[in-house]
Image (spheres, rainbow, N blue to C red):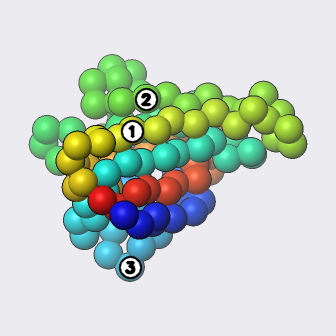
């Protein structure tokens, strides 16, 4: 097992979802992981929507229907002391249960985002 840290990932414009792998050289390349951890940035001021690309593989705005949204991460209570909300997803019996490139983010406030890390089985 290894830890893969993607660090800070922000969404430029709310309503235009972006992959959590957007900062990598090839953001669409498959990255099999066993667990994913996402934590709200201290500077966030709105919700962060954690979602998949959808059945068609599209990256369309899903904030109204939440049809492919797995979780909503609220902004921290305080940018200095937190708490800093987070979400963890894991597939303990399947070492490569998630493709990190299929995970996307959307936001209510432009520039909000998360810290991303994953466990590679």
- Pointer 2 local density, CA inside 10 Å: few below 14, some 14–19, many at least 20: some
State the mark number for residue 71: 2
77 over 113 or under it: above or below: above
- On the rendered structure, is 27 left or right of 94? right
Tell me which numbered mark, 3 or 1, is placed earlier along the sequence: 3
Q: From the viewer's side, name the closer residue of 84 and 16.
A: 84
Residue under the image location 23 percent in, 65 percent down: 30
Labels 1 & 2 near each other (Cβ < 8 A): yes
Return the residue at label 1.
89
Q: From the viewer's side, name the closer residue of 63 and 118.
A: 118
Tell me which numbered mark, 2 or 3, is placed earlier along the sequence: 3
Residue under the image location 75 percent in, 32 percent down: 83
* Quarter of the image that includes the C terminus: bottom left
Residue under the image location 59 percent in, 44 percent down: 39
Secondary structure found at label 3? loop
Alpha carbon separation for disc pair 1 and 2: 10 Å
Q: Quadrant of residue 96?
A: bottom left
State the mark number for residue 25: 3
Alpha carbon separation for disc pair 2 and 3: 26 Å
Give coordinates of residue 67: x percent, y percent.
27, 24
Residue 22 visible in the current orientation:
no
Alpha carbon separation for disc pair 3 and 1: 24 Å
Give coordinates of residue 4: x percent, y percent.
45, 66
Q: Quadrant of residue 50?
A: top left
- On the rendered structure, is 113 left or right of 57? right
Counting the numbered discs, the total is: 3
* Quarter of the image that includes the N terminus: bottom left
Give coordinates of residue 119: x percent, y percent.
40, 57
Secondary structure found at label 2? strand
Tell me which numbered mark, 1 or 2, is placed earlier along the sequence: 2
Give coordinates of residue 98: x percent, y percent.
26, 50
């Amino acid at each position: 097992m290894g830890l893969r840290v993607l660090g800070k990932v922000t969404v430029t414009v709310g309503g235009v979802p972006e992959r959590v792998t957007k900062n990598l050289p090839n953001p669409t390349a498959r990255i099999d992981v066993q667990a994913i951890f996402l934590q709200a940035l201290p500077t966030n001021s709105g919700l962060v929507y954690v979602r998949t690309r959808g059945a068609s593989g599209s990256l369309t705005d899903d904030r109204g229907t939440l049809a492919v949204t797995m979780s909503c991460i609220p902004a921290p209570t305080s940018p200095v002391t937190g708490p800093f909300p987070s979400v963890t997803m894991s597939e303990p019996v399947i070492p490569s249960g998630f493709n990190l490139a299929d995970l996307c983010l959307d936001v209510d406030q432009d520039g909000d985002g998360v810290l991303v890390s994953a466990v590679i089985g």
